[in-house]
Image: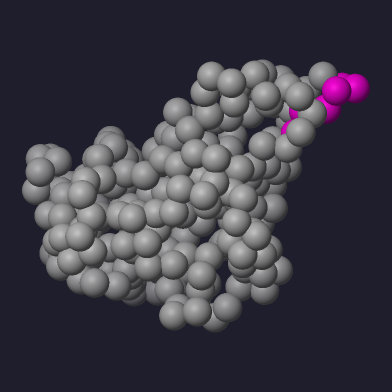
Amino acid sequence: MLVGRRIASVVTSSIIGLTAVVLLASAARAADPLPVRVTGIEAGAGKLLVSVGMQDLISGADLQRLSSGFATRVLIRIYLHQEGADEPVSVAYQRAEIVYDLWDERFRVRVARDNGGDVQREARTPEEAIWGTCALWHFPVADLRRLRPGARYFLAFRADLNPISEELLADVRRWLVQPPPGQRRVGAGDSVFGSFVSIFVNPRVEDSERQLRFLSQPFTIATAPLRGSR
């Protein structure tokens, strides 16, 4: 696990790590809590950065379909939660697309994030293309100044393979073109994010072809961010 200078992991037990989610799930009468996946958590340039792999979202027949020439899309949503709080501190997302170029015999990968930037690259193998769309590396989730030293936090991840909800796709396009003030702050009308319960605890199966949902291990901010950090 990657640990930055001002981030400290405080709990390793998955049972304790699920406390906040179990409470929310009980309120929503959900049956199963979410699994925990070890996540790299660190601080950099005044941001909370995460690193975690979700390559298992694409496998089997989906892996073979990558070379068909049709686009494969992946939408990843990340909720930052303080334990015991009902509303998330912030939300970030990444939208990615893989298209196989039949003429050049290579994959075209395009990645867009809510914090700006649209990156395009080439990949020679399906595995390389999947890593470029389903693995987060030093991914910025929130400004450290929004986190309280000593408070316990966790991250909730959801990855969707080929989202098929027209409303969801329209919201993603809207955010890419003109993110609202605060960008990763959750708003009541931001259906691209939805509520924690609807997105993570009791999701609609028809939203996408496949879903991957899990939590990070709990962590704390050891000290307050340096003044003037960005």
Residue 195 spot, x, y in % from top left: 38, 68
Q: Is residue 23 depicted above or below 101 in this figure?
A: below
Residue sitting nearer the eye, 211 or 125: 211
The answer to whether residue 73 shows anywhere in this view is yes
Q: Residue at x 53, y 65 (%)?
A: 192
Residue 203 spot, x, y in % from top left: 39, 54
Q: Is residue 113 depicted above or below 146 in this figure?
A: above
Q: Residue at x 54, y 46 (%)?
A: 208
Query: Magenta segment: does it hold 103?
Result: yes
Question: Dividing the image into 4 quarters, which one contains the N terminus?
Answer: top left
Q: Is residue 25 depicted above or below 61 in this figure?
A: below
Q: How many marks?
A: 0
Residue 27 spot, x, y in % from top left: 18, 66
Region of the chain picked out in magenta, as a range: 99-104
Question: Dividing the image into 4 quarters, which one contains the C terminus?
Answer: bottom left
- Name the image quarter holding residue 82: bottom left
Residue 117 spot, x, y in % from top left: 66, 56
Query: Magenta segment: does it hold 35?
Result: no
The answer to whether residue 224 shows anywhere in this view is no
